Image (cartoon, rainbow, N blue to C red):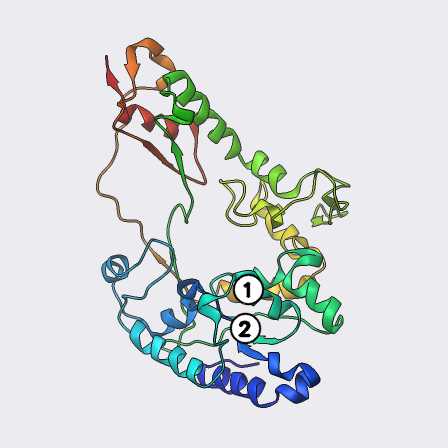
Amino acid sequence: MPSTLEEFEAALFAFRDNAELLLGDDAAHMVPLFMTDDVGWLLGPLVESFIPNDITDRDLYITEVGGDARRFFAPGAKEAIRVVNRWFNEGLIHPDFAISETEEMENLIRAGFTGAVAGHSHNQAIRGGEDGWIGQLHQTQGEHANLVVVNTFQNDAGYYRSIVNAGPPDRTMFVPKNPLGNETTLEQAVAALLYIDFLSRPETIQFLQIGFEGINHIVHENGAIEMIPAEPGSRYVMNSPQNFDITMPINGFRMATRELTELSRPFAYTGVDPRIVIDAYALAAVGVRTRPNVNAGVVQMLTPVLLVPKKAWVIPSEKEVMLLGPELSWLRLTILTRYMKPK
C-alpha cells in the first residue's frame, strides 16, 4: 500500500496505465482518483500535508474557510493545488468532475471504476451497507473487492497530520425568532431548548444511532452492538448510518459510554469486515492536531429561564439565538437569557 505522496501518485499512474488489464472492456471508464465539486473536503488531507508542521494556532484559525476543514488560504495550500492540477492534466481525475453530480461520480466507485479516494471522511467508504460503496463493489466486482484506508500524505516534519477543530464540530442549531411566520414566545423557545437537550442526552443519542434491538441491531454476549439492516420498506430503515447528518446532535459513532462505543465500533457498519472498520478508525487517529476554539468573550448566564415569570421577558425581534451542539446541557441552554430583555 502507498505510504507517501510519491507512492500514491505512482499508484494513480498505475491505475491509468493498466486500465485495460484491470477493467477489460470497461477500461475507458477508469478514473484513478475520485473527485467531485466539493474539492475542499476531498483534498483536505493533501492540503494539510503541505501546511508547515510548525504553523501556529493563530495562523490556522485566520486561514480557515467556513470552519469546515477547508484550508485553501493556509501556507502551502497553493503547492497542494499545483499537484492536483498536474494530476488533472495527466488524466488521473475525471475531466467533468466539476460539473457532474456527486452521485454520478460515486457510481464510478460502486462500479469498481475508481482507483482511489482522498478525503476527510475516514468512514465514507464503509457507510451504507449494501447500498454503500463497499456493498455495491461486492455486488459488481465480487466479495474480494474492497476499499481500505491508508495514510499517504506526510508533512514537512514527516508526520501524517490531520487538523481538526476543537469543541462543537460543524453542526449549529437555531431557535428562530419567527417560526412559521409567528413570533416565538418564551414558552415555545424554552420548549425547543428542552427538546434539544433531550436529543443531546447520551441515552437518546444511543437510541437514535442504533434503533431497536432485533430490527436495527443485535447485542453480542459481551455487550457489543452490531448493526443489521432493517427490512426494506420498513419504517425503521435508517437513511443514513447511525443517523449521521440527519439527527443534529449526532456527528460520529457514539454510544452512551466510551466502553460500549469501543466495543461496538467494529460492528457499526453493516456488510463491512470489522477489520476494515478498526483499521479505518486507527489510521484516522494518527497525527491528529486540534486547533483550539477562539471565543470573542464569555456569555454570562443572567438567571435560569424557568425561574422567571414567562410574561416578564420577551425575545428581541432583531435577535436569533444560536446554540452549538452536540453536548448541550439544560443549564448551558439558559444562555438564551443573554438574548432577552425585560418588558
In the image, is residue 129 above or below residue 178?
A: below
**Residue 232 located left or right of residue 184:** right
**Residue 134 located left or right of residue 150:** right
Q: Which quarter of the picture shows residue 113?
A: bottom right
Q: Residue at x 74, y 45 (%)?
A: 230
Q: Which residue is mark 2?
A: 150
**Residue 212 located left or right of residue 191:** right
Q: CA distance from mark 1 to mark 2?
A: 10 Å
Q: Is residue 122 visible?
A: no
Q: Residue at x 23, y 12 (%)?
A: 343
Query: Is label 1 in contact with label 2 (beta carbons under 8 Å)?
Result: no
Q: Quadrant of the N terminus?
A: bottom right
Q: Residue at x 43, y 31 (%)?
A: 329
Q: Which residue is mark 1?
A: 282
Residue 249 vs residue 179, the one in the foreground = 179
**Residue 269 located left or right of residue 162:** right
